[in-house]
Image (cartoon, rainbow, N blue to C red):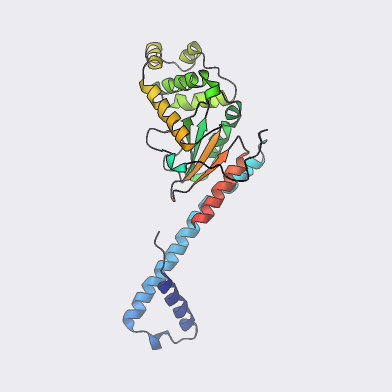
């Protein structure tokens, strides 16, 4: 969005004063008056657009915050007073990133998760609820697999199973994550095939091939480069300005809402 220069703002302020005392025409030529009117109209358009965007975002944030205040907080240590020192330039988002919600959302919750992490399991409903309740597709959720070394080999094994089920139907990714978050899922291969109507031959072949493992290895490498040492770790990305902020742990929903609101205000 274009902004007025200091000179232009000064001209507007001066002209407003001059109009107030009825002497604008005394000092300005017809050409200058036309140019000034265009400038004033541009200023009003910019202000109105900013107000409209802010109103929409504030409405959405208010709805989410109201919901979060009625949600029982997760019993987990609160987020640190200072943001973790992570290399945020390593966050990679592209068309292959698992995304729940509006692809063109203003904000993305990029979560680094481990299927063997109990805090991740309890946290899984939080980003989903934020996406489901936000107005106008304000927020989306992007999933990154970040198995911790002391949770291996099961953490990687479960991630591969989820990805292979999703390879047959992308909706399976989020069904599995949601059921896992609600403690309704144990990743047994036979159960997955029956539960999601998978082609057993294709599914078992996927588990043994390198394609899905390469995707998982990419997530792992990104997680290490970012500096993730615990899960869940969430990077909130403002897709409009490029700003990124980090929240560690399974914190209450209102912490995410407050952070998004602060990022929005900063961008205005």
Spot occupied by residue 259 in the image (x, y as percentages of width and height): 57, 47
The N terminus sits in image quarter: bottom left
Q: Evaluate whether residue 55 shows in this view.
A: no
At 54% from the left edge and 33% from the top edge, which residue is drawn? 229
Q: Residue at x 36, y 79 (%)?
A: 33
As drawn, 205 above or below 57: above
Total label count? 0
Q: Is residue 147 above or below residue 92?
A: above
Image side of residue 131 versus residue 41, left or right: right
Image x and y of residue 194, in percent:
47, 13
| Residue 243 seen in this snapshot | yes
In this view, 163 is above or below 105: above
Out of 177 and 248, give the one closest to the viewer: 248
Residue 5 percent coordinates (x, y): 41, 69
- When the figure is inspected, residue 9 is found, relative to residue 78, above or below; the finding is below
Determine which quarter of the picture holds residue 221: top left
- Residue 3 picture quarter: bottom left
State the image coordinates of residue 133 (x, y, percent, origin top left): 55, 40
| Residue that protrudes farthest toward the bottom in the picture | 26
Q: Quadrant of residue 218?
A: top left
């Amino acid at each position: 969005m274009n902004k007025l220069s200091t000179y232009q703002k000064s001209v507007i302020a001066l002209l407003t004063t001059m109009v107030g005392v009825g002497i604008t025409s005394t000092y300005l030529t017809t050409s200058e008056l036309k140019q000034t009117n265009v400038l004033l109209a541009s200023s009003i358009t910019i202000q109105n657009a900013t107000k409209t965007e802010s109103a929409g975002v504030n409405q959405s944030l208010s709805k989410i915050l109201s919901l979060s205040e009625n949600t029982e907080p997760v019993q987990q240590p609160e987020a640190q007073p200072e943001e973790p020192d992570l290399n945020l330039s390593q966050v990679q988002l592209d068309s292959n990133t698992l995304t729940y919600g509006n692809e063109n959302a203003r904000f993305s919750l990029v979560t680094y998760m481990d299927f063997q992490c109990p805090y991740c399991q309890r946290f899984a409903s939080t980003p989903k609820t934020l996406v489901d309740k936000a107005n106008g597709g304000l927020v989306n959720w992007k999933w990154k697999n970040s198995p911790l070394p002391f949770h291996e080999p099961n953490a990687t094994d479960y991630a591969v199973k989820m990805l292979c089920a999703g390879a047959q139907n992308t909706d399976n990714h989020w069904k599995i994550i949601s059921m896992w978050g609600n403690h309704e899922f144990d990743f047994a291969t036979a159960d997955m095939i029956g539960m999601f109507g998978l082609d057993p031959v294709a599914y078992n072949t996927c588990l043994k091939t390198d394609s899905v493992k390469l995707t998982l290895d990419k997530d792992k490498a990104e997680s290490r480069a970012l500096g993730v040492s615990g899960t869940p770790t969430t990077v909130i990305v403002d897709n409009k300005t490029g700003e990124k902020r980090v929240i560690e742990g399974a914190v209450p929903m209102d912490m995410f809402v407050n952070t998004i609101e602060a990022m929005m205000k900063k961008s205005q």
